[in-house]
Image (tube, helix red, strand yellow):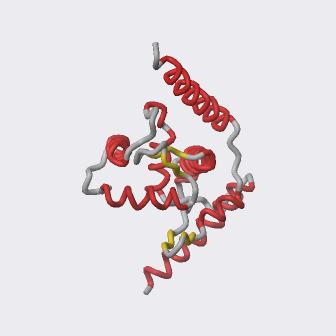
Amino acid sequence: MNHLEAVRQKFLEVTDRFAGLQAECLNVHVEFPLLQRLALPITIGTAKFPGIKIHDTRMIRLMEVLLHGGTAVGGWRAKDIHAAVITALGITADQYGLNRLRYDLRKLKAHGLLVRDGKRYAYRLSEKGTRVALMFVLFHQKLCGPLANSLFHHQPDAALRPKGKLETAFHKADCSIQSIIQLLEAA
C-alpha cells in the first residue's frame, strides 16, 4: 500500500512517454535543416564527435532498436542495447562489438538524441532523438527500400522516354553511374 503512489507515478510517466511516441509516429515529416545539422560534426569541450549521416546504416539500425524501447520501462543499458541489436540484425558480437556500440551511443548523446534515464547508466531516446530516429528509419523504409527493390532495378532502355520526374532523375543518375563504371574499367 505504501508504494502504490510511486508505482502510479511511474506508470503515468510510462503512459505519457508511450502516448508521446505514438503521436510522433503519426506525425513524421522530414526536416531537412535538422538532417543537415546532424550531419555536421559537433564539439563538446575537447571531444569532437562526427555527424550522423542519413546513409549510416549502423546508426539507423541502432535507432530502430531504440525506437522499439517499449519493453525497457527504465531505459536501456548498453549491454541490453547490444543484445537487442545483435538479435535484431542477426549478427555476431564480433561484427558489432560493445565498444563500437558505446561509441555510437556517445555520438547519439552528443547530438542530443539520447539521454540518461534517471541516475542509472540506462539510456533512452530524447524527444528530439525520437523525432530523428523516426525520420531516419521511415526514410529508409519508405523511400530507400522501395527504390532499391523497385522496378528501377533493371537497366533503363535509352530508347524509352521516362514517364515521370522520378524515373527521369533515376535514368540520369543511372547513366552517370554507368559512365563512371566505364571510366574505372578503362583505367
- The front one of 35 and 176 is 35
> Residue at the location (69% across, 51% down)?
30
Query: Is residue 146 something one can see in this rendering?
Result: no
> Residue at the location (74% across, 56% down)?
165
Compared to 45, does 95 lie above or below?
above
Percent x, y of residue 64: 49, 44
- In the displayed structure, does residue 38 sit left or right of residue 91? right
Percent x, y of residue 168: 70, 60
> Residue at the location (55% across, 25% down)?
9
> Residue at the location (38% across, 57% down)?
102
Residue 159, picture quadrant: bottom right
Q: How many marks?
A: 0
Percent x, y of residue 122: 42, 45
- In the displayed structure, does residue 3 sit left or right of residue 136? left
Query: Is residue 18 something one can see in this rendering?
Result: yes
- The front one of 175 and 58 is 58
Q: Residue furthest top?
A: 1
